[in-house]
Image (cartoon, helix red, strand yellow):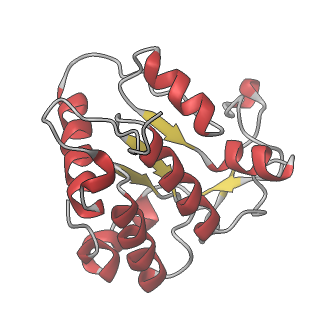
Amino acid sequence: MSNQPITQVTDNGETPALTSPSTRAASAAARFRQLLATPDVIQCPVIYDVMSAKLSAQLGFPALYAGGQTVSASMYGVGDYGTITISELIEFSARIVDAVDVPVVGDADDGGGGPLNVYRTIRRYERVGVACVMIEDMYGVGAKRVTGDTQAGGNPGALPGKSNSPFSPYAGRVPLRPERAAIKE
């Protein structure tokens, strides 16, 4: 038996473990943008651990989603009620990115707080190689309830007591603030 480490080589001949995180993020972001540019529906399963990520990638899914609900459920056995931290979400996403060679979308909840927290969150996700970050403004002024009541137009997958804000009051924040400057790729 050899003492040589087992490495995976990508289609372009790079070894992921030897590729810098910023290069991986740029490559993943570019591949994710290519997926978004197609007219096809992108099936992006929500994964809950490294094994489900590997299985999903082996089954041919073109991208994966590391969602807060599944991270919270797999780590603590409870729903996504703010139990997990941004650091835990980023650490989880880093493990997934290291395990698979498909773009990973990371859940950043509300980005960690104000504009400077969002800036730091985006930079940290980028450093671990996440292709895209989803940020939800969940607690702002005018927040509406997201419920599982589909009769009232709710989201059947939502948790009771969670709320999301309408997009329009927050649309102006991103281009004008530091969080926009954090995006490198």
- Name the spot of residue 181 as percent of width and height, x first: 24, 76
- Name the spot of residue 81 as percent of width and height, x first: 79, 57
Which residue lies most toward the left here? 12
- Name the spot of residue 40 as percent of width and height, x first: 27, 16
| Residue at 67% across, 33% down | 155
Which residue lies most toward the bottom here? 116
| Residue 22 vs residue 119, the one in the foreground | 22
Side (left or right) of 110 relative to 13: right
Among the 4 quarters of the image, the one containing residue 144: bottom right
Among the 4 quarters of the image, the one containing residue 123: bottom left
Side (left or right) of 178 relative to 95: left
Quick check: 79 above or below 37? Answer: below
Side (left or right) of 16 relative to 165: left
Side (left or right) of 37 relative to 97: left
| Residue at 78% across, 31% down | 149
| Residue at 35% across, 66% down | 127
| Residue 180 vs residue 149, the one in the foreground | 180
Total number of numbered discs in the rendering: 0
Quick check: 104 above or below 124? Answer: above
- Name the spot of residue 3 as percent of width and height, x first: 44, 45
Among the 4 quarters of the image, the one containing residue 180: bottom left
Quick check: 141 above or below 84? Answer: below
Which residue lies most toward the front here? 1
| Residue 159 vs residue 120, the one in the foreground | 120
- Give the quarter of the figure containing the C terminus: bottom left
